């Protein structure tokens, strides 16, 4: 049961990364690409958390935490730039 | 399955780097460069180096993109 859930999560994360990169390649506007970057950040955080559970090391969760805070700041900076702030 | 994810992330780093060079818009190019750094950090975690990954995520994906955005803002007269 738990094994099946982990495999399903891995497949979903794989497809998320693949289609996110596809959107990054195909996206016409800048906003499309920045939204793709934001989605890929969230998918990457979930991948790190999944690997932390699979490998049984809780230190990888710290990496995911730092990652979430900083990626939030980067996407916020992009949004401020598009609104002529920064 | 771990090798499959490492291959996917390495291909994504390659695609992001090529897009960062080839894209015409500088803002999207800065985003692609930050994304390449982000995938590199995830790849470091999967290969067993969490401290390197934390440094890469904070410097490459956080600070470098902010400095790039600040430089783009200072060197262009009007926003795109």
Image (cartoon, coloured by chain):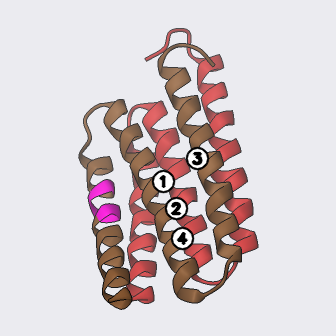
Chain colours: A brown, B red
Dot 3: element: helix
According to the picture, the residue beneath numbered tag 4 turns out to be A49
Question: Does dot 1 land on a helix, a strand or a loop?
Answer: helix
Find residue A71 and name its label: 3
Residue A45's tag is 2
Residue A12 vertical placement versus B34 (above, below): below
Mark 2 and mark 3 residues within 8 Å of each other at the beta carbon: yes
Disc 1 and disc 3 on one polypeptide chain: yes
The answer as to whether the residues below labels 4 and 3 share one chain is: yes
Q: Locate residue B47, reporting x and y percent.
A: 59, 83
Residue A38 falls in which quadrant of the image? Answer: top left
Q: What residue is pinned by disc 1?
A: A41
Main SS category, magenta section: helix
Q: Residue at x 59, y 52 (%)?
A: A68
Distance from disc 2 to disc 3, alpha carbons, whole Å, reads 10 Å
The residue sitting at the front extreme is A1
* Dots 2, 4 in contact, CB < 8 A: yes
Segment colored magenta: A16-20
């Amino acid at each position: 049961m738990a094994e099946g859930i982990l495999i399903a999560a891995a497949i979903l994360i794989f497809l998320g990364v693949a289609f996110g990169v596809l959107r990054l390649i195909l996206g016409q506007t800048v906003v499309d690409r920045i939204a793709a970057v934001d989605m890929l950040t969230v998918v990457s955080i979930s991948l790190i958390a999944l690997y932390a559970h699979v490998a049984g090391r809780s230190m990888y969760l710290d990496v995911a935490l730092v990652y979430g805070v900083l990626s939030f700041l980067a996407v916020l900076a992009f949004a401020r730039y598009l609104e002529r702030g920064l | 399955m771990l090798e499959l994810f490492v291959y996917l992330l390495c291909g994504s780093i390659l695609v992001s780097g090529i897009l960062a060079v080839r894209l015409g818009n500088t803002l999207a190019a800065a985003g692609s460069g930050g994304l390449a750094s982000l995938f590199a950090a995830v790849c470091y975690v999967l290969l067993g180096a969490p401290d390197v990954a934390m440094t890469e995520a904070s410097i490459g994906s956080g600070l470098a993109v902010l400095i790039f955005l600040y430089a783009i803002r200072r060197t262009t007269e009007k926003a795109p």
